[in-house]
Image: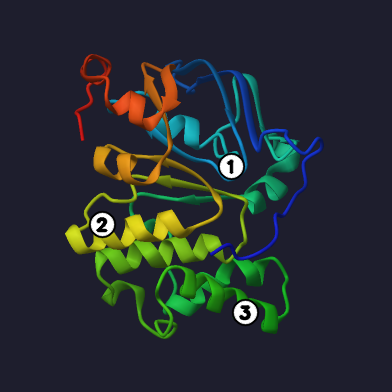
Amino acid sequence: MTLAEPAAARDPVDAPLVAIERLVFRYPDGHQALHGIDLTIRAGEKLALIGPNGAGKSTLMLHLNGIHLPTEGSVTVAGLPVTRENLGRIRALVGLVFQDPDDQLFSPTVYDDVAFGPIHMGLPREEVDARVARALEAVGLTGFERRQPFHLSIGQRKRAALATVLSMSPELLVLDEPSAGLDPRGRRELINLLRGLEQTLVVSTHDMKLVAEVFPRTVIIDAGRIVADGPTTEILADGPLLEAHGLELP
């Protein structure tokens, strides 16, 4: 269900989509949230970030589209350093979906929310309409164009929030706790949706069953450091590792 060809080519072909090297981040109050993170993500990968609350997962994710910039080290997306000079291009490549969909849905209709990004890209009306239609189809909300977002269920609002990002045709999708607050039906719909997306996915979650069903690779972060990175089947089978970092078996 990819919506467009990749927005940026990488040379050489096998270069990672995301390259993070020795990333350190300190908040203005001096708290150091990340301690020398090294991580590479290949195009098309589906990667889960797991770890206890306060581990640094969200802080790391916010570096991928430049909401946070490194204190030390570097973050590169599709060959572009994540710097102030590149923020416009980076944010066209990286779609960030927040845990609370109401942080992203602010317009009178679903159409207006999903069209917001393409309109501000300066695209012609025909292309905007086409992108909205493709994004809503991808998330199973065709026919919801004139619905008011605040009248939707939480699961529908989460899908609408994802559509607002898909309409920008990003290469990388970054989702924070996408299954939080969903009932079993909504959670199953989310799993099927994420499985079908062809974009590279990075998802922060405490939902170990979601991790097991959707993400072939898992990274554990604790105290601002990567403590494990490998196949999900191996990581989720290591009970002592999970327990040591405040996680439960699925």
Q: Nearer the viewer, residue 29 or 144?
A: 144
Q: Earlier in the sequence, mark 2 or mark 3?
A: 3
Residue 6: x, y in percent? 70, 54
Pinpoint residue 128: horizontal percent, then vertical percent.
Answer: 64, 77
Residue placed most toward the observer, 77 or 215: 215
**Circle 2 residue:** 187
**Distance between the Cα atoms at labels 2 and 3?**
28 Å
User: Where 145 falls versus 94 (above or below)?
Assistant: below
Q: Residue at x 60, y 65 (%)?
A: 3
Tag 3: Cα neighbours inside 10 Å, few (<14), some, or many (≥20)?
A: few
Residue type pointed to by label 3: Ala
Q: Left or right? Give the position of 9 relative to 100.
A: right
Observer-nearest of 67 and 243: 243
Which kind of residue does numbered mark 2 sit on? Arg
Could you say where residue 133 lies in the image, as x and y percent from the top left?
A: 54, 79
From the image, tell me which residue sits under label 1: 65
Rounded to the nearest whole Å, what is the CA distance between mark 1 and mark 3? 25 Å
As drawn, which residue projects farthest toward the right?
11
Q: Secondary structure at mark 1?
A: loop
Binning the other alpha carbons within 10 Å of mark 1 as few (below 14), some (14 to 19) or many (20 upward) gives many
